[in-house]
Amino acid sequence: MPDLLLELRSEEIPARMQRRAADDLKKLVTDAMVERGFLYEGAKAFATPRRLALHVAGLPARGKDVREERKGPRVGAPDGAVQGFLKSAGLTSIDQATVVTDPKKGEFYVAVIERPGRDTLDVLAEILPQVVKSFPWPKSMRWGAASAQPGALRWVRPLQSIVATFGPETETPEVVPFAVDGIVAGTTTWGHRFLSPGPIEVRRFDDYVQALERAHVVLDTERRKDIILHDARDLAFARGLELVEDDGLLEEVAGLVEWPVVLLGTFDEAFLEIPAEAVRATIRANQKCFVLRKGGSDALAPAFILTANLVASDGGLAITAGNERVVRARLSDARFFFETDKAVLLEDRLPKLDTIVFHEKLGTQGQRVERIAALARELAPLVGADPDLAERAARLAKADLVTEMVGEFPELQGLMGRKYATLQGEPASVAAAIEEHYKPVGPSDRVPTDPVSVAVALADKLDTLVGFWAIDEKPTGSKDPYALRRAALGVIRLILDGSFRLHLLTIIQHQVLFVQGLADLPGKYDEKRRGDGHTTRQVKLEVCEQIADSLLIFFADRLKVYLRDQGARHDLIDAVFALRGQDDLLMVVRRVEALGRFLDSDDGRNLLAGYKRAANILRIEEKKDGRAYEGAPDAALAAAGEPEERALSEALVVAREAASTAVAAEDFAGAMRALSTLRAPVDAFFEKVTVNAAEPRLRENRLALLNALREATQEVADFSRIEG
Amino acid sequence: MSSAVDPAPKLSSDEISSHKTSFQGLILTLQNFWAAQGCVILQPYDMEVGAGTFHPATTLRALGPKPWKAAYVQPSRRPKDGRYGENPNRLQHYYQFQVILKPNPPNLQELYLASLDAIGVDLKLHDIRFVEDDWESPTLGAWGLGWECWCDGMEVSQFTYFQQVAGFECAPVAGELTYGLERLAMYVQGVENVYDLNFNGGSGEDRVSYGDVFLQAEQEYSRHNFEAADTAMLFRQFTDAEKACRSYLDAGAPATQTERHRMAQPAYDQCIKASHVFNLLDARGVISVTERQSYILRVRELAKACGAAWLRTAGGGAP
C-alpha cells in the first residue's frame, strides 16, 4: 500500500506552536482523506524549528469504483422529463439508458452511472493545497512580493519549500502535483541551516528521515528531547552535579534546535547569594538554560546546561564562553534587583500600590490590600490565627509586586515577598503567609495549613470574588478571565481541609459593603430618604444581599463540582442546599455525608420510599382540592382514629423534635437516626390506613399527618430533590 | 603643490574600517554590506526618537506599494533606561543600525547571516538562533512577526516582517532588521562594559573609548530624565505637538479625492515629537498607569492619521 510523505519547510517556527501544528497537520490531511472515503493504516506528524512533516502509511492507490442505477421517466414521457433525466444522469442521448420493464409501471428508463475510483494522487493534489492555505496557525503572516496582492498565502513565517510524494515502497514514488502561491511541491528539501545547508533529494518517509539525520536534522521532537535530557544528565553527572529537570523548558528547547548539542557552562559561585528561585528564573527565562544542583543536595550549583544548535569547530568553547557572559550579565542584573529590593522595607512600598489600578471599577491595588487586610483580621479568629499577624501579612502580601525582581519575573510573586519579609525580620508565619496566600492555585496545589496563611488566602480570594460579583463580571461559559472558579474552589478547599466554620453569607455581605465603600459609614445614608420611603442604605443593603445570594449559589455550584469529583451524589448536595441559608460549607458537607450514609441503609431507603409516597399523595390531593395541607395535624383526632394513625402521629412529634435537636447540635447522624424511627410507623400507616377516608375531617387530618412527615424530613434535607 | 600639514593618517584605511577594533568600524562594515545590497545609506533622522523604526524612512516608507531599500544608524533615546552611567549594559542613548527592505527579499535570513559574517561572527563557531519575538509598537499602531536573533545566547538583533504600520496593512510586506550596535560591538571586541568599547580603533594616546564619548552624557541625561526635565513644559509640548500635527494634516489635506496630501511628513515630525515627550514624562514618573494608556492612544491616533496622509502622497504610491 502506498504512503504519503509531506514536508512544509519554513523559516523558524516558534517553539510553542510546533507540537500543536504537527497535530493539526495530521488531523486536517487524514480527516480530508477519510471524508472522501480514503482510509489509511497509520499517520504520524513531526515538527522541528524549520519544518512540519507528515507520514501517512497504507493509503489505497485509488478510491473504490462506484456503480449507481438511477431510475428515469416512463418510455414515452414528455421530452422535458427525458431531457431533465439525461442532464441529471450525465448522459448525452437516451440511447445510453437501458429500458426496464416493470409489471406495474410498464417500461421506463434506467441510467447506470459508473464512476471509477479517483486516483489518490489526484485527491491529494486537491486536499494538500487546501490544508496549506487554511492552516490554523495561532498567528500567521504575509511576506515578500506576493504580499502586495490580496488573498496572499499566510503561514507562521515565510514558507520556503514543499515536499510531497506518494507511492508504494517498491517503486519510485510520484510527486503530488500541486503548488501554493508559486511554491511547487517536489522532492527537494534542505538540511541543517549551518551544518548541512545544501539541498537533499528525498523519495519516501524512510529515506527522508535518514537523509535528514545525515544532514544534521533530528526530525522527531521526542528524540531531540531524549538526546538533550540524557546528554544533560551525563554532563552534570560527570561533574558530580544533578540536572534540575524542567519539562516545559525541555519542550521549548527541543523546539529551538534541529541538531541538539548540549554544553555545560559555569558562573561565579558568589551569584548563589541570590535566592535559588531567582537564579533559576533568570537562567531559564532569559537564556533557556537548565540549572544544576549539587549532588545529593537541594542547593544550586554555579553551573548551567545550554543546548546549542551547532557542532562548533572549536568544540563549543566560544559558544559556552558567550553564554557564560550573558548569564553573568543577567545574574548581575538579578543581584542588583535583589540588593535594591532589600534596601526598601515592604511596608514602604505600599504607597506605590495606590498608583496601580487593580481593576477600573475596583480601584487600586492599595485599596484592595486595605480590604484584604480588614477581612483577614476579621477571619483570623475563625481559623485560629492571631488577628494582628493576619492583618500584617495581608498588608504586606502584595508589596513584592512592585519590587524589581517580581517586575522582571512575575512568576516569583509571593516567593520574593517571603524572602524580603524574612530578611526584614517579620515573624515566620507572616513571611510564610505572603507566599502562601496565593495557594491553592489549582485543584492539585497544596492547601496552606498555617492559620495566618489560611486567613490571608481566604481573604484574598473572597475579596476578589466579591469584587467581581459586585461589578457583575461573573464567569460565563468557558470565559473566566479573572480565574474566579479557581478562587472559589480555593476557598472551598481551604475551608474543608481546615474544618473551619464560616458563615459565608455574612462575610460576603460585609465585604460587598466594603467594596462599595460603604462599610465604615453606618447610618450615613439614612438621612437621604428616597421618595418611596426606602433609605439609600436600605436599598444598598438589598443589593448587597442579592449579590451575596448570587455568589453563594456560585459557591454551591463549585462545591457540587468538587464533591462530585470526590464521588458524592449531586442530588444529595442539591437536597441540602435547597434548605434556606446553607452558607456554612463544612456543615453542608457533613450533612451530605450523613445523608448519603443514611440513604445507603435499609431504614433510609424505606423512609425515602415512604416520603415519596406521602409527597405523591399530597401533590395529587392538594391539586384536586386546590389547597395546601400545611396545618399541624390534630393529635386528639389522630389518637381517636386507627392505632397506626395514632402511632405515626406520636412518632412524628418525637422524631421531629429529636431530629431538630440533633441538627442544632450538628449531629447529622443523630438526626438521621431520629428520622429512621419513622420508618416502621410510616410503613404501617400506609398498610393499614386509608388516607382518603369518607369522613372529610379524618381525611384532612391524615393528609396533615403526611405533611408533617414531609416537614420532619426537611429538618435534614429537601427530600424532594433526592433521586431514586 | 605641497602642504605644510602632514597628511599621513594615523590609521590605515583597513584599520579604520575594521569591525574588530572599533565601534565606528563596525558601523562602516554594516553600511558597506547593505550598500552592496542596493540600499540607500541614509543618515540618522534629526529628531529624538525611541527606536530606528520611528525614522520616516521606515515608518512612512513601509506603507504603500513602492519598493524601498534603506539602511542607516539611528541614535535612539530611551529616557527610562538611563542608569547614570553606572550600569555596564544599559544606556538612555544608544545606536541602532536599521535596515528596511520592501518587499522583503526571499533570502533575507541568509543576507542577515552574511552580514554577521561580514562583521566577524564566524558562523562555524557561534550558535545563531532565531527565537520567536512578535514585535508590536502600540504608539505606532504597528505590528509584525519575526524573531530575536541570538548569538551564543545573546540577543544581537531584531528581525521583523512588518504586517501593519500606522494601522494600515503593509502591502507588500517589508522586512526590518535592527542591530543593537553596542551589544554587537561588545561581543566582537570581547568587552564586558559598554564604556570600555574602543570607539575609533586607535591605541595608546589615540584610543577613544565609548566612555570618553558618552559617559558624561549618560550621567547628565539620567539626571535630566529622572530629576530635572521640566514636566510642565513637557505637558505643554505634548499638547502643542498633538495640535500642530492635526493642523498640518488639515492644512495639507487634499481638497478632492484625486488630489494628493501635501504635508504628511511635517505632520509626522510632530507625532515623533509627541512620542518622545511622552517617554520623557513617563521617565519622570508623572504619568499614572491609567493615563499612560490614554497617552499611548493619543500618539497612535496621530501616527494613524499621518500614515493615512502618507498613503495619499507620491511616496506613499498615490496616483
Image (cartoon, rainbow, N blue to C red):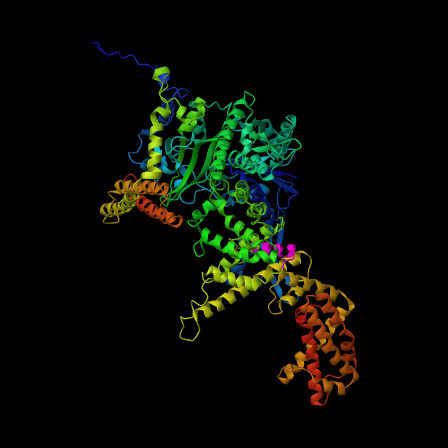
Give the left or right position of residue A466, taking residue A609 as reference. Answer: left
For the C terminus of chain A, which image quadrant?
bottom right
Q: As rendered, which of A222 and A145 lies closer to the eye?
A: A222
Q: Which corner quadrant of the image does residue B136 belong to?
A: top left
For the N terminus of chain A, which image quadrant?
top right
Q: As rendered, which of B66 and A301 lies closer to the eye?
A: A301
Examine the rendering and report whether any part of residue A273 can be seen: yes
Whole-percent x and y of residue A595? 71, 65
- Which segment is the magenta one? A486-500
Give the left or right position of residue A368, taking residue A44 as reference. Answer: left
**Chief secondary structure of the magenta span?**
helix
Q: As rendered, which of A639 and B316 lies closer to the eye?
A: A639
- Which residue is depicted at the point 44% across and 73% down? A534
Whole-percent x and y of residue A71? 60, 60
In this rendering, the answer to whether A100 lies above or below A157 is below
- Which residue is depicted at the point 47% across and 38% down? A343
